[in-house]
Amino acid sequence: MSESRAFCPRCGDPVPERSADDESGDAADPLRPGSEVDLCDSCYFEDFDFVDAPNRIDVRVCARCGAVYRGNRWVDVGAQDYTDIAIEEVSEALSVHVDVEDVAWQVEPEQVDQNTIRMHCFFTGVVRGTPVEEQVTVPVKIARQTCQRCGRIAGDYYASIVQIRAEGRTPTSEETDRAKEIAHNIVADMEATGDRNAFVTEVGETDDGLNIKVSTNKIGKKISNKMVEEFGGTVNDAETLVTEDSDGNEVYRVTFAVRLPPYTPGDVIGLADDTDDDGPVLVRSARGNLKGVRVTTGERYEAGYEEGNSPDARKLGEHEDAEETTVVTVEDENAVQVLDPETYQAKTVARPDYFDPDAETVPVLKSRAGLHILPDESASASAEE
Ligand SMILES: [Zn+2]
Ligand SMILES: [Zn+2]
């Protein structure tokens, strides 16, 4: 190897020459013409700027939902408070010199006033084998605004209404609670994918059910389909022209009318069919055709296709109304004597196959159709489907 020496291009001091391997990487940096040879350490550190920070950072934050305005749109950053947002924005805005290795930083937020947080940032790292550190302070100014979504929610904007109703009855609280839950879950799932247009505008109880106003037709459709999938029933949609948008396109609002079936699991119904004398049915499912069990025999019942989920029937009571009563004696395979829970007289009733001959007490329902033994609550869960 020749005795060639390298010199600092700025001050002319000799600098240790680097090995050929090293040279190949750095020497011909086209962005730094004339710097095929590196500056000496002293010249290098004279110019060295570890951290590049703006003088201040202005952030627009939605005061309602905490979204932050970035570029030209609102973004959900999932921040818990304004300090979180300030930290996030500072880490986006600061940059450290590319040569520095092992960079670490800490930040101490100092709340100056309601809308100003001073961020004290402390950086450490290593460059050219020398430890470096720097402290910068960046004030973050928070401007509280209202994002487009929150503005729409506040303005009661909605594109679709889901009406939860039931045939011949009012929806149960289980059904309306579930409808609310489904609506919020669907919106949460869409939000999780970054969709900022998904929201529930309003949930309102009415005399005959529940109205859910939502931001898009798609959400309305999803909610109503899910309700029918879980509870049975039907859904009809109807479009109403509400206005024209600024481009002259017609804007429709869609109403999804969910009609839940007349009977729900747990209802005990008497079928009105004259030819049917097999006794009342405890309803197990109203999805598709109504299904249940005869409380006289324990046999399965399923409504015909024509009847669907609403066979001609009348409601006699609910499993919840059943009272626990004493078994007096088992007469034979078709009959049991139990105490009438009202008169306390022994009464002979039909013996369904779910009746446990060893049971001392059984749940019975007294209705217009007479006294019937119902399946035990714990047994009923696994008995069907
Ligand atoms: Zn130099
Ligand atoms: Zn907002």
Image: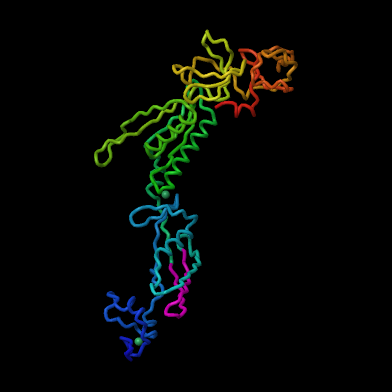
Residue 127 relative to residue 374: left or right: left
Q: Which quarter of the rendering shows the N terminus?
A: bottom left
Quadrant in the rendering for residue 320: top right
Residue 120 relative to residue 373: left or right: left
- The location of residue 176, given as percent across then percent down, is 51, 32
**Magenta span has 121?**
yes
- The location of residue 286, given as percent across then percent down, is 50, 24
Residue 346 relative to residue 37: left or right: right
* Dominant secondary structure, magenta: strand
Q: Which quarter of the rendering shows the C terminus?
A: top right
Magenta span: 117-138
- The location of residue 142, given as percent across then percent down, is 43, 59
**Magenta span has 306?**
no
Q: Give the vertical position of 255 relative to 126 (above or below).
A: above
Residue 348 relative to residue 247: left or right: right
Q: Give the vertical position of 319 relative to 92 (above or below).
A: above
Q: Nearer the viewer, residue 137 or 178?
A: 178
Q: Which colour scheme is used?
A: rainbow
Q: Which of 229 and 80 is in front in this view?
A: 229
Q: Nearer the viewer, residue 45 or 359?
A: 359
- The location of residue 53, given as percent across then percent down, is 39, 70
Quadrant in the rendering for residue 276: top right
Q: Which residue lies furthest to the front in this view?
A: 1
Q: Give the vertical position of 150 relative to 268 (above or below).
A: below
* Number of marks in the rendered image: 0
Q: Which residue lies furthest to the top in this view?
A: 274
